Image (cartoon, rainbow, N blue to C red):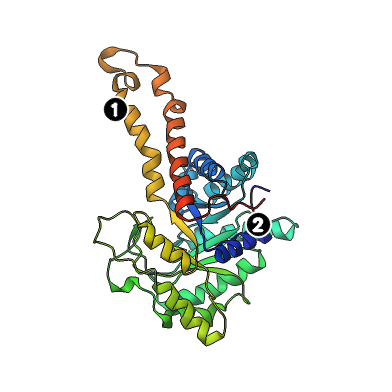
Amino acid sequence: MPIATPEVYNEMLDRAKAGKFAYPAINVTSSQTLHAALRGFAEAESDGIIQMSTGGAEFLGGQHSKDMVTGAVALAEFAHIVAKKYDITVALHTDHCPKDKLDGYVRPLLAVSEERVARGENPLFQSHMWDGSAETLADNLTIGQELLERARAAKIILEVEITPTGGEEDGVSHEINDSLYTTVDDAIRTAEALGLGEKGRYLLAASFGNVHGVYKPGNVVLRPELLKELNEGVGAKYGKASPFDFVFHGGSGSTEQEIATALENGVVKMNIDTDTQYAFTRPVVDHMFKNYDGVLKVDGEVGSKKLYDPRTWGKAAEASMAARVLEACQNLRSTGTKIK
């Protein structure tokens, strides 16, 4: 069971919350990066989450048509086959999807899973993200209600981002300012609109100073202790301890202490993209620089097929990214926690 069933995915998230660890959610854009993520999880003996953003899915769809749904479905189907060779369980997730891309990405993918469930099968993806952070909170939650209802019927978990994450990802950008901190009132309004599980399970990407990308120290002020305030504020109103399952966005470059505090306060999923992109690319650059006259036909020579063969540098890229995924599992305390 390499791809989690809906029941197993719920169990994974429950185990993470109870054990105060989180699953690395690794963005992938190719079969190579998918294998790197799976390999890293397997070497860490950790279950995990594989995810595709709109830009990643568009890239996977090929530059001829750039069709996001085709790209996402194709890699998901591929993952269902190749993941069987890895002794871990992974969930498939779609990352940031803003309002203007819902009709071209999340809604069609929900329809794919609805059809599968109607046939008695499991959904193709285990969770989808709705990124309404650029909308008013009222509009964000209204759309969230519609998507949560459909997700629940298709046995899918929804992820919602209710307030902005700074920086830029796939064309969605927010300034780095005081709006990057979710308030207790924001969290209460979310609970009022989406419930606390009775309307369908969702993951909450609350903002505590998060910024996409990597910034030099001092430019970003993370306050992971804010998550405790949100849980306590909503928990007191509804009589439910630790009501939210939090997602850590914009975590690249975070300190070990910041990550540890976030885990203690309810984070069960942490997105990792920038660091794994660099880990994948770095050995490729090293190979090209060191073998310049082999990968190029310089001065009329023929180069070296063994050096410009994509398998040569691709293997190094996979190994490097897998090592970074292993490191993420260690930082998030998921190492050795795989479901037996």
Q: Position of residue 268 (x, y in %)?
A: 51, 63
Residue for point 39% across, 79% down: 183
Question: Viewer-nearest of labels 2 and 1?
Answer: 1
State the SS at label 1: helix
**Residue drawn at x 44%, y 75% as measured from the top left:** 228
22 over 245 or under it: above or below: above
For marks 2 and 1, the one nearer the N-term is 2
Q: Nearer the viewer, residue 44 or 29?
A: 44
Q: Position of residue 256 (x, y in %)?
A: 38, 57
Q: x and y percent of residue 204 in the render?
A: 49, 69
Q: For the residue carrying disc 2, how many other residues have a C-alpha within 10 Å: few (<14), some (14-19), or many (20+)?
A: many
Residue at numbered disc 2: 123
Q: CA distance from mark 2 to mark 1?
A: 44 Å
**In screen coordinates, is 85 left or right of 309?**
right
Residue 136 numbered tag: none
What SS does tag 2 mark? loop
Type of amino acid under label 1: Phe
Please name the residue that numbered disc 1 is placed on: 289
Q: Residue furthest top?
A: 301
Q: Label 2 sits on what residue type?
A: Pro
> 93 or 72, which lies in front?
93
Left or right, residue 45 beside residue 254: right
